[in-house]
Image: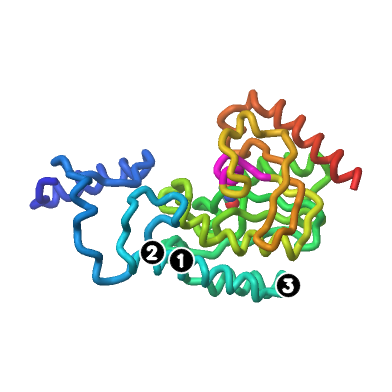
Amino acid sequence: MPIVTTNCEYDAARALLRWYAEMGVVETVDPSPTDFYSWRALPPPSEPTYSQPKQVRNAPSQPEPVEASVDEAIAAAEASAAGCANFEALEAAVRAFDGCPLKAGARNTVFTDGVPGSDLLVIGEAPGRDEDRIGKPFVGRAGQLLDRMLAAIGRTRSENVLISNIVYWRPPANRTPTAFEIALCRPFVDRLIEITAPKAVLIAGGASLQALLGVTGIMRARGVWREIETANGQRAPALPIFHPAFLLRQPGAKRLAWADLQSLANRLKEH
Ligand code: URA
């Protein structure tokens, strides 16, 4: 990138960067080609750094310190979550957990909102700008639609639903959380399910579907009941549904979401 020398160039560069950020650009690339094959031959970094967890890592031979720090970070999350006997302890553990790199860029930890003893648990993707500012999940436009959807089946945050996400800190520029960030939060998500033992988990959106059930393709998976199994082997019925942000963009899909909500309401009534 050319070196910026004058105020005018500085303002133009700043405006351009802001525009990129607003357009959702989250990666920068070099103007000249990079030989990615030569990366593997580089010496290991002197400081341990985070990388992708084992199952999503694509470079076969990562240096030892990187692997160790990934496994250690996940093991720390597992140990912290396993030590929580109740909801309050779990909330405190999530707030105290410093192992997820997202936390450094977030204003708030966004854990849950609603009633912890509810028989319905909604799990979305990640906090966005409004959630990060306020510290509660689903408070922006998508959250307001979620509230209306839940209200249609007699559920409100003040009475009978608990809402959370697969990660507890806002990813930069609202990008999808990485597999590593998801893996770090997963022990807490599992423990939340174990502690609150909901009769149903409503999985909002494709990213949450993939993270919780390992299933891709929300278009085909929505409306089909499955089971989430936690690390301890506890099971909970789970229903994937379109993410409310998707429904804001595609109002025509609300018809299908309505059918899914009916299925949820019937299930909760049955049990
Ligand atoms: N979208 C989500 O998936 N979760 C939130 O908390 C907000 C928006």
Residue range (magenta): 203-210
Residue type (three-letter) at the residue carrying disc 1: Asp
User: On the image, numbered disc 1 is attached to which residue?
Assistant: 71
Q: Which residue is painted at 10% across and 50% down in the image?
A: 3
**Could you give the CA–CA distance between mark 3 and mark 1, rounded to whole angstroms?**
25 Å
Q: Determine if the magenta segment contains residue 111.
A: no
Q: Determine if the magenta segment contains residue 208.
A: yes
Assess disc 2: are there few (<14), some (14-19) or many (≥20) residues with their C-alpha within 10 Å of its C-alpha.
Answer: some
As rendered, which of 258 and 20 lies closer to the eye? 258
The numbered mark at residue 67 is: 2
> Contact (CB < 8 A) between labels 3 and 1?
no
Please, which residue is most extreme toward the top here? 252
As rendered, which of 258 and 234 lies closer to the eye? 234
Label 1 CB less than 8 angstroms from ligand 1: no
Q: Which residue is painted at 72% across and 33% down in the image?
A: 223
**Could you give the CA–CA distance between mark 3 and mark 2, rounded to whole angstroms?**
31 Å
Residue type (three-letter) at the residue carrying disc 3: Asn
Q: Can you tell which quarter of the image residue 21 is in?
A: top left
- Does residue 191 appear anywhere in the picture? yes
Q: Where does residue 198 sit, x and y in percent of width and height?
A: 78, 55
258 is higher (above) or lower (below) than 200: above
Of pointers 3 and 1, the one earlier in the residue sequence: 1
Label 3 or label 1, whichever lies nearer to me, is 1
Label 3 or label 2, whichever lies nearer to me, is 2
User: On the image, numbered disc 3 is attached to which residue?
Assistant: 86
Horizontally, is 60 left or right of 150 in the view?
Answer: left
